[in-house]
Every structure is written in C-alpha cells, then in structure tokens.
Image (cartoon, grey):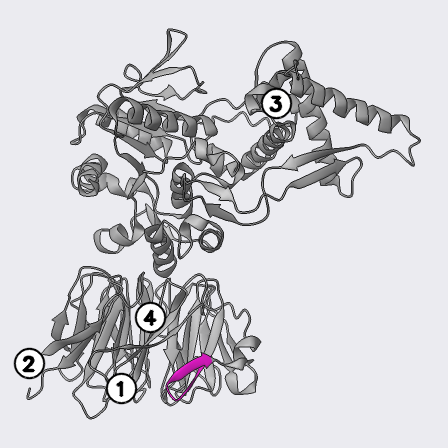
Amino acid sequence: MDLYTPSPQNLVEEYIHNTFEGLNQQLALPASQAQPSVTLRSRVCPGTYIVNHQNGSLEASRSTELTRTYSWPGKTAFEAWRFTVIIRVLAIIEQAIKDRKTVTKRSVILYLGSEEWADEREPGRDIYYIDPAYFKSQVIINNIIEDLAYTIGVNRAALNVEAAGKGLVAGPVVLKREGQVILDARSSQDSLIPRIYEEDEIDIFVARWVLIVEKEAVFHRLVRNNYHTTALAGEGIIVTGKGYPDIFTRAFLRRLLEHAARVRGRTPPFYALVDGDPDGLAIMSIFKYGSAAHAHDNYMYTIPTLQCLGLRVSETVPRVMNYANKASSPLSMRDRQKVISMLRNNPAWASNGPETESRVELQRMLMLNIKAEIEMLYDQNGGLEGWIDRKMFRQE
Amino acid sequence: MSRQYLAWGSADHAHPVDIFSLAVTSKQILSASGASSLKVHSTVDPDFPLVQSIDGAHELGCHHVVTDAEGTRAVSAGFAGEIKVWACHDGHWQEDPVSAHLPRLNVWAVALSADGQYLAGVSHSGRIGVWDLGAEGTQIRDHETKGSFGYCIDLSSDGRFIASGHENGAVYIFTTEEGRMPFSLAGLVKPVRTVAFSPLGSILAAAGNSKVIVLYDTKSGEQIGNLSGHSGWVTSLSWSSTGEYLLSGSVDGKVKVWSMETKMCVATHSETEKAVWSAKWLPKSNRSECFATAGANRSVAFYREASGG
C-alpha cells in the first residue's frame, strides 16, 4: 500500500527538480554531445474535434498523445527562444512555490523582461484580442503554462501562476469564501470575476436571467443604464469576458448554472450577445461548447443551454440598417478565411452538428459579405436595451 | 397592367438549410445550399419530385450553381473555394473529369457559356477569368479590375460579353473576343449583387444594395431604365426566355416580375419574410411561363402564369 500521496505541489517541485537535474547532466557533457532539451505533452491535438453528446462539450476525437521537444540551441531561433522561455517560466514557478506566493501570468511576462511583452498600455479596451503582438506573447506563455500543468498532471493552480482575472460581472451575485464576502456584484458597477474554488459559496438571489456580452464597452453601457435591474424580464446578471473569455469567467458562469440547478431545480436562461462577425460566433461557441485549448477539460466550463440573442447579420443588416452605417462593414479576407476554417474545423458547426443555425449564419455572412457590431443596435427603437427586451421574450 | 402568377407547388424542405442558388434545364431544377449535397428536382412532374441527390458535392456548402443552355453541363462553386463541373447523361448528373483540372480558381461567382464550353468567374479581388472546359480547363482570359469583391458575373447567350458586379458598386462589361472593356459604365453607389444579360444580349440588368434595378444598353453602355420598388437588397435577377419580363428576388422575401415594355412591376409575390437568395424562370416549353424561387425558407417554390390572361 502506498502511504505517501504526493501533493500537487510536490509533483511540481519534483518535476522541476528532475528537469533541471537532467539539463545539468547534459551541460556537464562535452559540447559536441550535449543535447539539453525539455519535452512537454501538448494539450492541443492536431487532429479533429467532436462535440461530446453526453456533456455537450468540445473534445479531441482521438486520445493520441502529442509531445513536443524543445532543445537548445535547436533547429531555429524560435525553438531556442521557446526553450529559454520554458526554462525561465520553470525558474519563476520554483521561486513562487518556495516563497509560497502566487504570481500572475502578467508578472511572468513582465519578469521575462522583453519590452514588447511588457506592454503597459491600458488593457481595458478589448486589447486582449485586438493587439496581435501582445496577444501572441500572451498566447505562447499561456500555452507553455498550460502544457506544463498538463505534462506534470496537475491543475494549473498548483504551479502558483495565475492569469489576472479579466471578466466582469454586475447584478445579484454574492460570492463567499470561508465566510467572507469576496465578491458582491450588487454594490459595484463592475466586479472583477475571480478564480472560483470548490468550497466557495455563491448566491444569485432573484436573478431571472444571465446575459453574457462579448464587449466590455457594451457591458458598461448596459450596467450604466441599470439594465440588470430594469430589464423587462426582471432582475438579472450581466457578465463580460472582454472578448475571448478567460477560464475564470467560464468557470464562474458554470458555477452559476450548477448553483441554480441545485438550489432551484431549474436554471434561468443564459443568453449571449455577440458581434455579428466570425469572432462573435467563435466566442459564443467557446462559452457554449468550449475551446480547442481546453479539449481535455471543457466539460467543467461549458454552458450547454446558452442561447444566442444575436447579433445576426442576416436578420438585422439588410432590412434595418443603412449600409453606410459605421457599425457594419464588408468582411476582410482574414474574416472570410476565419469563417471557412470555423465551418471546416469546429464540430459544433458541422453539417450534422448541434449548431445548424450558427452554421447557416456563418454562410449567410459569406454570402452577404458583411459583419456588424452590437453598437449598431444603439439607435434601434428603445435602444439596445429595448432590443434585448424584445429578443429575450421571443426566445422564451 | 398586372399579371397573375399562381403558386404551382413546391419542393418543400428541399434542403435542411438556406438554398443559395438555383439552376435550370428543360426538365430539371438544380439547387445548391449550405448543406453538402446538390439536389435535382424534376420540373416535368407537377409534384416536383426529387430525382437525384448529389451527396458530398461541397463539404462546406455551395453558393453558386449554373447550367448551360442545353442542360448537359453544370458548374458549382463551394464555400471552401472549390469549383466542380457536372455532366448530365439521360437526366443523371455525375462529376465531369474536367473538374480535376480546376483545383483552385479562386473565384466566387461563376457563369457558363450557352454551349457549356467556357466557364467565367469573378474573384474576391475582382479579377475576371475565363476557362476553356473543352481544353482541360485552360485559362484563356484574365482581366483585372479595381480590386473590389466580385459578387456576380454573367455571360451573354451569344458569348460575346461578360458582365460583373462588385462590392464598390462597379459594373463592368468585357468583350470576350478582344478581351477589353468597350466603355465604362456608370455603376451603382452600393454593392452590386446580381447582373443578368437579356436573352438577345442587348440589355444588361444590375441590382444590389441600392434596391433599384438598373438597365444598361450593351451597345452604348448608357443607362436606359431604373426599376424601383424593392424595399430590401436585390439578390437575384432572371430574364424570361422572350426577354419580355424580368424577375427579381430580394432579402426581404419578395419576388417581383417587371414588364420590359412598360418598365413597371406587374406582379409581387412573397410567401415568407425570409430572404430570397435565388429566383429563376424555367426554360420556355409549351406550357405557360413559370418561375422558381428559393432562399432562407429552404424550399423551392414554383409559380406559373395564370392562363387566359
């Protein structure tokens, strides 16, 4: 019988120790024989994905393991750079565990020290997916951290590296940890969505609906106009992931769903309000089915009952709006390619998949060659709020 | 003087998703949709039965399908960018081997010459190409325009002219013989989604987001008429076999028939508010004039002229 069950943190320390030990051995060899390298299990399988019928989550269709080896100096400058980044990330984690503190992904980026990475611009305005240089380094480092956790076989929290939260929530939600209120979204206009733990207690009071909006600017407008307390459908909760959501936002929404199911026996409707463009539909799909990067654990974060309120280009643009309206524009070549790859690769949008109407919407977007932003609804009758009121009633 | 067209039946739920394009032969109608199969319905039998389903034709769906005058050849264009050529033998369609020579033409809209030998296409960047399907798909023409997305293209039935319509509102006419523009047309201000030559090639009709159908004289390039009445973007135009009537379809679900004699709308039909993506006259036979429409309601609806009118 095994008396010693290592804690996740032990596993991490052991892994880092062994990795550095292995590298030291390599470095002790004559230069001609030394092959310092690190091998990671990759979460992202290059194969295809399926939507699991049992839990409605996006999963990899094959369980084949893919590993990637990064060596020094490597075949390309990029491989050498990645190798360096992995080693430095490991060193940061080792230090954080030793000091018993948690570092944020952002400070990892700052620590790594490149000017380009340490972009100090205000991240509020949808920068997460607009600024490609910033996004790229975020993605690479995030992938390395996720791959390390996956390789060691622990939850990411055990690495003591956490992304700073970015999702916002407003409405009747209170979150308590060990008896202390750590989030009360009733009292503030925009509460940051924190990492949520198993033992946290959540209360959603009288919330009749949950609305996920893609854009931060739209979230602020709705909250400023008190839509969460004045909606025709009653009081509700508004959430934004500021573009492509982080895992905390997804975990938080999933907890709302599970909590309502347990306490009330039925869940309030969950709605999504996204731009009428490829990114909008991709974001909707991540909330509902999950992302390719989390194919191994999407089932913990999905909202299978999520309904898309819009914006549907095909029902809004050709009839209501003047083409000259600034909030709509022709698709770029990149948009069109993105739609085609979404149709080809995401099983949710496959011809026999669960999202036939979204598939059609993507095809109509290609036909009409147009995209539209939620902001175009601001000058609708009753404003955006009136439009959402009408939509919510039609969906029920 | 209004004319009456009666609902003549339909192929209900012909596709599980939006039907984007229709093409006709003397006995059949081909439909293309966001699903992967092309469907072939008989137009001889008033029940419009499905006679063939070409499964797996376009994995990501198909946005254009066209036929030649004899109904022996068809060409379809898929969302993934692929072009396929189909040959008809005794009413049955199968892929033409010449398909293999047309891997990536990089075209959006396509048109086929009356004899089925030449394929014309317009690309996302507004390039217009012509390919000889009788010579293993060799490209024989390549015209550059101003780089604006090409939504639509048509070939005159005598094969002398090609016309295209673009995102920036431009309308171009090229002569196939010399490969040049005989004149420049005053285009529309907004995207042009459909262009169609009259049966004798003397008139070009163009329409799109401006909702007005503009008629051009193909000899001079002058605008000779405007047909206004649609309240939504116009997606489709089709001339009757005699050139007396023009059929138009719109995203607001309406189809209209226009008299060329009076330049007036003589009939309006709408069964749904859902977008009409395609409207087509059936070739003239010894019955009265008929047309078919299809779109976001996913069925093909047929209409015929009320007799004795």
Determine crowd level at label 2: few under 14, some 14-19, many 20+ residues with C-alpha closer than 10 A: few
Badge 1 crowding class, 10 Å Cα cut-off, few under 14, some 14 to 19, many 20 or more, is some
The quadrant of the rendering that contains the N terminus of chain A is top right
Q: In which image quadrant can residue B53 be found? A: bottom left
Chain containing the residue with disc 1 = B
Element assignment for label 2: loop
Q: Is residue B80 above or below residue A19?
A: below
Q: Which residue corresponds to mark 2?
A: B1
Instruction: Identify residue type, mark 3.
Output: Val
Q: Which marked residue is nearer to the observer: mark 4 or mark 3?
A: 4
Q: Is residue B87 magenta?
A: yes
Q: Circle 4: is it few (<14), some (14-19), or many (20+) Cα within 10 Å? A: many
Question: Which mark identifies residue B21?
Answer: 4
Label 2 – label 3 distance at C-alpha = 77 Å
Q: Chain of mark 2?
A: B
- Which residue is pictured at 78% across the width and 39% down the height? A74
Looking at the picture, how far across and down is residue B174, in whole percent?
42, 80
* Amino acid at the residue labelled 4: Ser
Structural distance between the alpha carbons of marks 4 and 2:
30 Å
Same chain for marks 2 and 3?
no
Q: Chain of mark 3?
A: A
Mark 3 = which residue?
A: A108
| Residue B25 % position (x, y) | 32, 84
The segment highlighted magenta reads B86-94
Where's residue A47, x and y in %?
57, 49
